[in-house]
Amino acid sequence: MTAPVTAPSPSPTESRATAPAIELKGISKSFGPVQANKDISIRVMPGTIHGIIGENGAGKSTLMSILYGFYKADAGEIFINGHKTEIPDSQAAIAAGIGMVFQHFKLVKNFTVLENIVLGAEEGRLLRPSLKKARGVLKQLAEEYELNVDPDALIEDLSVGHQQRVEILKALYRQADILILDEPTGVLTPAEADHLFRILNNLRAEGKTIILITHKLREIMEITDSVSVMRRGEMTDTVSTSGTNPEQLAEMMVGRKVLLRVDKTPANPGEKFLEIEGLRVVDDAGVERLKGIGLTIRAGEILGIAGVSGNGQSELLEVLGGMIPATSGTVRVRGEEIDITGKHSDGQSRRARGIAHVPEDRQHEGLIMDFHAWENICFGYHHDPKFQANRFLMDNEALRKDTEAKIERFDIRPPNCWTAAKNFSGGNQQKIVVAREIERNPDILLVGQPTRGVDIGAIEFIHKQIVALRDAGKAILLVSVELDEIMSLSDRIAVMFDGQIMGERLPADTNERELGLLMAGVTDAPTGAAPALEETIHG
Amino acid sequence: MDLLTIVQILDSTLRLATPLLLACLAGLFSERAGIFDIGLEGKMLAAAFFSAATAAITGSVWLGLLAGIASSILLSLLHGLASITFRGNQLISGVAINFLAAGMTVLIAQDWFSQGGRTPSLIGRGRFEQITLPFADAVESTPIIGPIYAELLSGHTILVYVSLLAVPLTWWILFRTRFGLRLRAVGEAPEAVDTAGVSVVGLRYAAVMICGVLCGIAGAYLATGLQAGFVKDMTAGRGYIALAALIFAKWRPWYALYACLLFGFLQAIALRYQNIDLGVFVIPVQVMDALPYILTVVILAGFVGKAIPPRAGGEAYVKER
């Protein structure tokens, strides 16, 4: 069940049964001076799961957008089941039996599941017959593939995992034989991801062809039959999954050897740097987001907060970072209580207390995208006397010198302090934020999703910086939805669910399954459950 | 206050609510598809002028209606071109249309008719006639039911009945047809429509065209039904009131009917009771005239609960990866 790495092109007389479900030949696409796809050829046999892996900006999404009719390739040909096919728009892709599940779902939030499914695939001018038919088909698909969703539920009331099922159902309802999934597990809990993989296995068993785009090596190893690696718009290689390993794939992605495990020594915790007691936050809508959080972080340790996004982790970071006020509770920094409810609770006062914050959403909270690198790198610390020329003016020259030093130390590319933040890649944007916060030598570092949308090479670098800060005797609070990242980086793991801490575990004494149950709010999980998915590969 | 007075006020409410309702439904189609339309006012005004001018010149109100609709559609297409094709700012495009209509109508009117920016008064077949419903005369003397039937329901121009019928029709189109499903989807999540292989641009143009037709009828009604001819700025902010009614109605057809009847009712009260003598002091006519507008401000200031507009409203659709 593996795609041949190199095989002769199918002759026109070749029977349909052996023709590849998808064959791309010499696809090229450029946006202005940027060559997003360069002479890409790929063959995917029917009834297989084919992975496409690569760093951000490697051209995976562009390639799939061409296949789904969003972009027109500058050169190259597409064959579906051995027939040359033109795909000028999404309608044509659907007609060719291609369905796509986007990373960001394309659903109408205040429509029901049924309405979303029939949208664009209605039977006639009136809705009633379409909805009736869809209801029947849905029932059948649910039984066949474990794709259960309430057809009358509104999308906005569904969990992310269920919303994704609706996307898959949409494709199947349009009788897609080829399913493309773009980073499908990024938003799922481990249990939901397992369920998704079961669905994909069922689909493969029914003869569907699946293309899985991901940057998670573990998923590639777990479910695909063959895998193509992309780097800088080019197809590096296509290999059969059974004949490769994560290290080799990572090397092909990045072009050099990458350390997949975080290399760190056991923690050596010191005095209590951050103590949180009974922290509560009620938001403007009256919803209690944090329901009495209690945590302690010592010098020289990394406390990782695991959880499905939206369970209060963001609010925890925002309160500690001074972005929103707490409703009640106490926070002590090195034994001294700080104001978290009143008017002195802001980002500036936190920095004065030695709390640095790498926010979750770097594009909105960490950076001003239209500003230059040197402006972004001083935000929050621009009052520093060393950046003042005199009483009224700032010393921009000193700022730029400081920036250039940071650019060099953090290997930020392009190494130009006049480049606007929006023109850096995700990884380099994150490096700018991390450089700004870490270089001030804080006592406590708050880090939210440090490697979201960051390529594998930069992940390695950022992880090293965080560990180095810990080794320098600082306290670090790490919030991430990537369980792998939490497992490999943390010295202690606390799991959040519904605004509460469900429990604390040591990484060595737990596994993904146990954490996954805690993340889903199940507290009476038997410890030492089956050690499924114990690999510590992240990325 | 006797029954006849009440019936007369309600009768007047119906007449005054008609242009609001048509414009409100016009805005509903446009905004449900994600195109904000502040240019309802301008489209109505243009339609009012061209329908009155055409009716005055040809003597046919039906030709006038067609000319009004045509002029309104033309402005709609302009709005569509600016905000759908060229992805411009929908508010600015709408404001531009309002200015354009306010200036051009008076200018052309002066050039054509030389009556100080008006059209000649319409007479005879140049206006929509009142339709007397069957048996209206026969039942008029029946107590209660008689006046309600003969005064309130009977004796309106055809456009009043058209506007009332447009409410269930709009509801049916929006919620029972394929076109309606897609139209609502394109105002909420155009990317979902696009990836489903349906043209976002096509749907939005269709919505804008429907908006043009309804605004055209509303304008024609103003000049050839409610009044007899065009005068400068005769829409008097009705386009904006219709927008307020649309928000009040939470972008739903039946609520739109109720909201427009409420605004029409306030206008009818203002027309009937010029000065209200409370004994201690007299509420001047200006206060009464200002009532619908005050209500508009109150509604727009959000005192009427949370109204959630279509999520993709006001934003041009740009395909992303």
Image (cartoon, coloured by chain):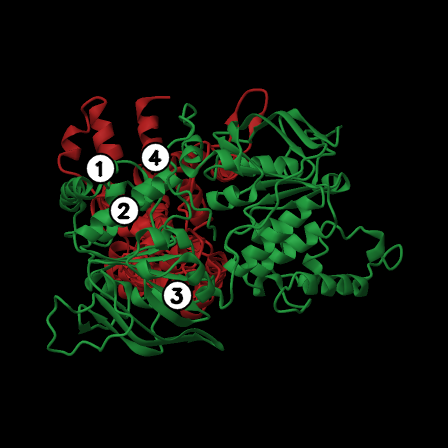
Chain colours: A green, B red
Q: Which mark is residue A229?
A: 3
Q: Nearer the viewer, residue A239 or A216?
A: A239
Rendered-image quadrant of the N terminus of chain A: bottom left
Is label 3 in a helix, a strand or a loop? strand
Mark 2 crowd level (few <14, some 14–19, many ≥20, 10 Å Cα) = many
- Label 4 to label 3, Cα distance in Å? 61 Å
Q: Amino acid at mark 3?
A: Val
**The image quarter in which residue A15 lies:** bottom left
**The image quarter in which residue A8 lies:** bottom left
Against A242, is A332 above or below? above
- Label 3 to label 2, Cα distance in Å? 34 Å
Q: Chain of mark 2?
A: A
Q: Nearer the viewer, residue B261 or B196?
A: B196
Residue A51 placement (x, y as % from top left): 33, 59
Count of labels in the image: 4
> Left or right: where does residue A383 sit relative to residue A272?
right
Q: To which residue does mark 4 refer?
A: B258
Same subunit: marks 3 and 1: no
Q: To which residue does mark 2 refer?
A: A116
- Label 4 to label 1, Cα distance in Å? 20 Å
Residue A335 placement (x, y as % from top left): 75, 28
Q: Which mark is residue B154?
A: 1
Q: Residue furthest right?
A: A390
Q: Chain of mark 1?
A: B
Is label 1 in a helix, a strand or a loop? loop
Is label 2 in a helix, a strand or a loop? helix
Q: Nearer the viewer, residue B107 or B173?
A: B173
- Label 2 to label 1, Cα distance in Å? 44 Å
Q: Residue at x 50, y 58 (%)?
A: A456
Q: Amino acid at mark 1?
A: Ser
Q: Amino acid at mark 4?
A: Tyr
